[in-house]
Each structure stands twice: as C-alpha cells, then as structure tokens.
Amino acid sequence: MFTNGLDVINRHSSGKAHSLGAAKLPLVSFVITNYNYAPYLKECIDSCLAQDYPLCEIILVDDCSSDGSMEICEAYGDKISVLRHEKNSGQLAAFFTGIDRVKGEFVVFVDADDFLDSDAVSAHLYLHLFERPQVGFSCLRNRQVSENSAIISDFHPDFQNNGKELTYIAPRVIHTPTWSWSTTSAMMFRGDLVKLLKTDMADEFRVCADYYLVHFANLLGGSLLFDRAKVNYRRHGKNNFSKNFVIGGHRPTGHDKFHAHPAQSSLQMAILNKLINERAKFEPYFPNLERYAETILFVAPLSFVLSNFSVDGELKNTLEKRAPNIEKQKKEQISIKKWAIRWFELQNRYSKIKVFKNNLISLYGVREK
C-alpha cells in the first residue's frame, strides 16, 4: 500500500520521482454533501471509492434529503460514514458537520452531483507534498458534464490559470469579482486550515459555500491551480452554477441577480467576524501585526472594518497606516484586469485584420509599390 500510494502520486510529476524517506503517507478525508441528489449519488460515491490513492476515508453528510438518498447510502455499509442533519441547514453547515468528524491531514469536499476521475486525489497530493510554495488548498480543472454524465466542455470558465499548467494564487484583496478557481469538488484543503474556518454564519452561505471557504482559505494560505481536468461538474439546472448554461456567453458566475449569490458584505462580515473576534486563533499565523492588519484590509475597506468591529488602539493605528497601500493594491488589481480585457479585445481585432489582409493577398496578390 505504501509503495502503491507513492507511485500514483509520482505519476503526476513531470520531473524526477519523489521520495518520502521514513515518513508515512497522509490520510485524505472526503466530505460528500448531499441534498436530494439521489439520481447522482451512487456515481459520486463510487468515484471516491475508486481513487488510485489507497488512504482515504469517506464521510457523507445528508442535509435532510427526502428522495431516497439514505437508502442508497445504507447499501455501502461500513465503506462510508453517514451523518444526517435533523433539519435542512445548507451546504456550508454540511461542510462543517463533516469537518468535525474527519481524521485526514487533507480534506476534499465533494458535491453529491459531481464525480471524480480515479487519480484526482493523487494529483492533489502531488501538489501539496512536492510542489512549491506550500498552500492552503489546491484546485484542479473541472470538466463540465450533462445530467447524463456526457462531457459538454473540458474547461471551466472561471479557472484562471494564465495559460500555465501550475499557477500560484497569492493572498490578495477581495473585490467583485476575484474568483480564479473551479468549484469545490475540484479542491483539496489542508485539514488544519479548514478546521479554523468554522463559522456561526453558515446560514448566509446555504448555497455557494465555496464563496466563503475558498476566499478565506486563500487569504490565509494561498492556493495552487493545476491545469489538469480530473473532476466532473454536472450541469442539471438545480445547482447554482449550472444556471450559467454553456452557450458561449460570459456572464460572471457569481451574479447576485441571476444566481442568488451571497452578497459581498456577507462574505466580509463572516471572515472579519473570525479574524477580529477570534484574533487569538489567527494572529499567530502572521509574522507581525502589519501582515495581520493587511489581511483584515484585504477583506474590506477600513471604513467597513471600523464601523462594524471594535479593535484596540494599536491595531487601529496599524490598520490606518496600511489602508492606503491596500487600497492602492485593490485599484491596481482592478486596473490590471481592465487592461487585460482591453488587450484581449485588441488581440482579437488584430487577428481579424490579419485574416482579412491574408484574404486580400490571396485574391489579388501582393502589389509592388
């Protein structure tokens, strides 16, 4: 088992094989969250059981389904652990119900309507164990599949890997929109990190739970994007993102009006409630007070922080000193994105001119001056 586990991880390396020395391989915990997804549930569970990496546990959290999901779960016996909410509480609450039970060093949250390739976990572990920098979570590329599991696109429109196989997303200012990842099923988190993020505001993220989890995790530990499709995201019209039908359009997937997406102010309040009100848990993760203050300002402007939270004099002074620089970073991020869009438009226009020019040359030849 030890040799096989390391072998499957090394298959994802484009360079030399890696060694663990005398260390043991880590346990990976799947937390499958389900609410009335009985038609897809078996395919999801089977894909987790079929991983080529051998050290996995599966915890399924059912959010009070009424469609026969529990009968499907019971058929697996002791292959999976099943937890059931007494009342419907939403996706983020289901995540944290699972987190309370996991034993693994790494955690993969899987939506019950998605399913994984057999080497998804080993691909994640390759990143966490052997790539640099160390990050809070990794993210693979999603495929998009139909209700019947047929592929309809090998790409996910939000996956911003900048054309590179491996892309590092550093902690950064959160503004609308700043999403760079796929969806939750394509991610693997460090277990000790997600246990820090449990919030009393889970009801704010009954849908789009990754909106809270991913932004907060990236603030604390950064993330790696791995441009290999290993996860299958199902579009069936009932899940939130799937309302963005694949018709060639480019509406942002986090649109409030069309997708019942949580407001940015809810995200800001939830993260700051943890960072500030539970300061003793988080401050040790930062090298100094300045970095801690900057992370707070990455979440929301100084005016928002001071109007909603009480901070001591030293932290307030540090926030006031760092605020102009963080606001500058935010404007730079927005400006860079606008210029990137403009550059894309110019490249597209140039491409059309080049095609038109070549057509004229082929029709009329090249005339000498």
Image (cartoon, rainbow, N blue to C red):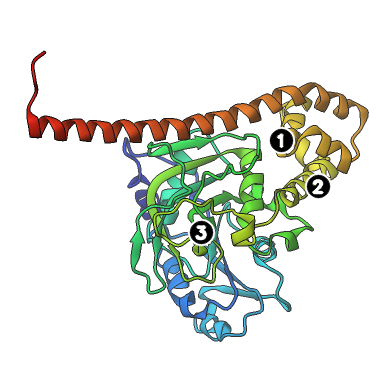
Residue type indicated by callout 3:
Ser
Q: Quadrant of residue 288?
A: top right
Residue 21 appears in the rendering: no
Residue 43 location, x and y as percent? 43, 73
Q: Position of residue 223 (x, y in %)?
A: 54, 41
Question: In the rendered structure, which disc, 2 or 3, sits on the residue that comes first in sequence?
Answer: 3
Q: Is residue 313 visible?
A: yes
What amino acid is found at the position of numbered circle 1 in the picture? Answer: Tyr
The Cα atoms of the two marked residues, 1 and 3, are separated by: 27 Å
- In percent of the image, x 45 and y 67: which residue is there? 235
What residue is pinned by disc 2? 273
Name which of mark 1 and mark 3 comes first in the sequence: 3
Q: Nearer the viewer, residue 217 or 270?
A: 270
Image quadrant in which the C terminus is located = top left
Instruction: Answer with the quarter of the image where residue 80 lies.
Output: bottom right
- Are the residues tagged 2 and 1 within 8 Å (C-beta)? no
List the residue tagged with mark 3: 185
CA gap, disc 2 and disc 3: 26 Å
In depth, the one of 164 and 127 nearer the eye is 164
Residue at left offset 55%, top offset 82%? 69
Residue that sits furthest to the top in the current view: 369
Could you give the CA–CA distance between mark 2 and mark 1, rounded to whole angstroms?
17 Å
- In terms of secondary structure, where does tag 1 sit? helix
Residue bearing mark 1 = 285
